[in-house]
């Protein structure tokens, strides 16, 4: 009862094709493929470039201001 059979999927695909037309579905799938390719390319670029050294967080300013509040 919880799973969809092959007939359900065929009906869903048929409705999508009827609503959007064959050309729009084809264009949409092409755009999805381009997005996946650019995503993979972006991941490969991230692996190729070394990460910059992270800046340390300036915690002393908060500690100084708390110390100034206590002293005054």
Image (spheres, rainbow, N blue to C red):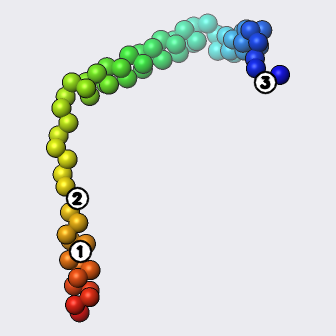
Q: Residues within 10 Å of mark 3 (few under 14, many from 20)?
A: few
Residue 46: quarter of image: top left
Residue 9: quarter of image: top right
Left or right of 26 in this view: 50: left
Q: Could you say which disc has been placed on residue 63 in the image? A: 1
Query: Is there a contact, CB below 8 Å, between mark 2 and mark 1?
Result: no
- Mark 2 vs mark 1: which is more N-terminal? 2
Q: Which residue is mark 3?
A: 2
The answer for how far apart the CA atoms under marks 3 and 2 are is: 51 Å
The residue drawn where x is 48% and y is 17% is: 32
The residue drawn where x is 23% and y is 79% is: 65
Answer above or below: position of 14 versus 48: above
- Foreground of the two, 32 or 64: 64
Residue 38: quarter of image: top left
- Mark 3 vs mark 1: which is more N-terminal? 3
The residue drawn where x is 76% and y is 20% is: 3
Where residue 33 appears, as percent x and y from the top left, is 45, 14
Element type at mark 1: helix
Left or right of 59 in this view: 10: right
- Foreground of the two, 11 or 19: 11
- Image quarter hosting the C terminus: bottom left
The answer for how far apart the CA atoms under marks 3 and 1 are is: 57 Å
Where residue 45 appears, as percent x and y from the top left, is 25, 24
Left or right of 40 in this view: 65: left
Where residue 40 appears, as percent x and y from the top left, is 36, 20
Q: Which residue is mark 2?
A: 57
């Amino acid at each position: 009862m919880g799973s969809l059979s092959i007939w359900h999927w065929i009906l869903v695909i048929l409705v999508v094709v009827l609503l959007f037309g064959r050309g729009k579905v084809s264009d949409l799938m092409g755009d999805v493929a381009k997005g996946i390719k650019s995503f993979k390319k972006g991941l490969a670029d991230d692996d190729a470039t070394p990460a910059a050294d992270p800046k340390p967080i300036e915690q002393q300013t908060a500690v100084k201001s708390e110390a100034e509040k206590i002293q005054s």
